[in-house]
Image (cartoon, grey):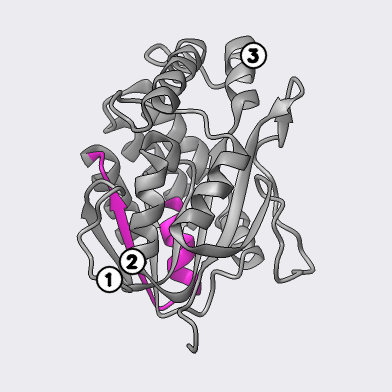
């Protein structure tokens, strides 16, 4: 059996252990994407040659493994036990020994103040009270530490209602999108998140929250569009910046504002 055949066989066996069709489909989709695509994205946002990086909401670990190939230490937090177990399994299979995995909610992470040089949070923050999460990220970052996250505007959910991408027997993207829009009305009306599930994150409100939390040097662009280091090989986007004339999936790169005189 060749190395490629072994990897495909490993992915198929691992996917079968996951409890839902949605998770099985998603796991295979992210790991059949070349790791170089993830590394290229990370180089584009300058997430390399760092001592300690946090992958907040690591899911199945595809970004953690790419981060581990570019940085000294990676700490990965995931709430879902099945996804965390799977991420550990893949890390072991790929030989990524510099990743520490822990289970937890990214709104409140069990780590000391100023623990990390950078925090990476891909397509997770919209499940949380994002203002609270941004304050937690600020606490965890060292002065001038970098924060990257991706999230969704209203257009992404309109796309899910109309086009229903990635459906499965146990996942209806249309229904989830409708629930998200409903949750968003409640969240912005009440000012905090009491309902489970995702919310819409309008870019201008998110930037205001970042400034309020103490971040600066904020760059916002469509998902996969930031290339701050001007790499000769630009990143590849997975999603569109707009759908049906409304904001789609976007990403933000920013920095923890250092104290004066530092």
Left or right, 61 with reference to 224: left
Q: Residue at x 39, y 36 (%)?
A: 12
173 in relation to 221, above or below: above
234 in relation to 248, above or below: below
Q: Where is mark 1, residue-wise?
A: 113
**Label 1 to label 2: alpha-carbon separation:** 5 Å
State which quadrant residue 196 falls in: top left
131 in relation to 41, above or below: above
User: Mark 2 packing: few (<14 Cα in 10 Å), some, or many (20+)?
Assistant: many
Q: Residue at x 47, y 65 (%)?
A: 67
Segment colored magenta? 61-80
* Percent coordinates x, y for residue 164 in the rendering: 58, 14
Q: Nearer the viewer, residue 135 or 9?
A: 135
Label 3 vs label 2, nearer the camera: 2
Q: Nearer the viewer, residue 102 or 168?
A: 102
Q: Where is mark 2, residue-wise?
A: 140
């Amino acid at each position: 059996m060749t190395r490629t055949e072994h990897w495909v066989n490993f992915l198929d066996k691992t996917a079968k252990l996951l409890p839902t069709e949605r998770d099985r489909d998603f796991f295979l989709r992210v790991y059949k994407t070349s790791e170089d695509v993830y590394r290229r994205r990370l180089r584009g946002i300058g997430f390399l040659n760092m001592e300690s990086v946090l992958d907040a909401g690591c899911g199945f670990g595809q970004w953690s493994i790419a981060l581990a190939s570019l940085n000294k230490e990676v700490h990965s937090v995931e709430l879902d036990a099945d996804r965390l177990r799977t991420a550990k399994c893949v890390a072991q299979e790929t030989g990524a020994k510099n990743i520490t995995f822990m289970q937890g909610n990214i709104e409140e992470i069990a780590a000391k103040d100023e623990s990390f040089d950078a925090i990476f949070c891909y397509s997770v923050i919209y499940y949380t009270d994002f203002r609270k999460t941004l304050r937690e990220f600020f606490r965890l970052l060292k002065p001038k530490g970098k924060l990257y996250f991706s999230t969704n505007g209203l257009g992404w959910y309109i796309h899910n209602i109309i086009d229903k991408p990635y459906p499965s027997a146990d996942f209806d993207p249309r229904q989830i999108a409708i629930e998200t829009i409903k949750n968003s009305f409640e969240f912005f009306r009440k000012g905090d998140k009491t309902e489970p599930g995702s919310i819409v994150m309008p870019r201008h409100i998110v930037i205001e929250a970042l400034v309020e939390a103490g971040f600066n040097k904020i760059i916002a662009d469509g998902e996969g569009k930031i290339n701050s280091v001007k790499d000769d090989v630009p990143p590849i986007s997975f999603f569109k910046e707009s759908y049906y004339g409304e904001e789609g999936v976007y990403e933000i790169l920013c920095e923890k504002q250092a104290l004066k005189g530092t």
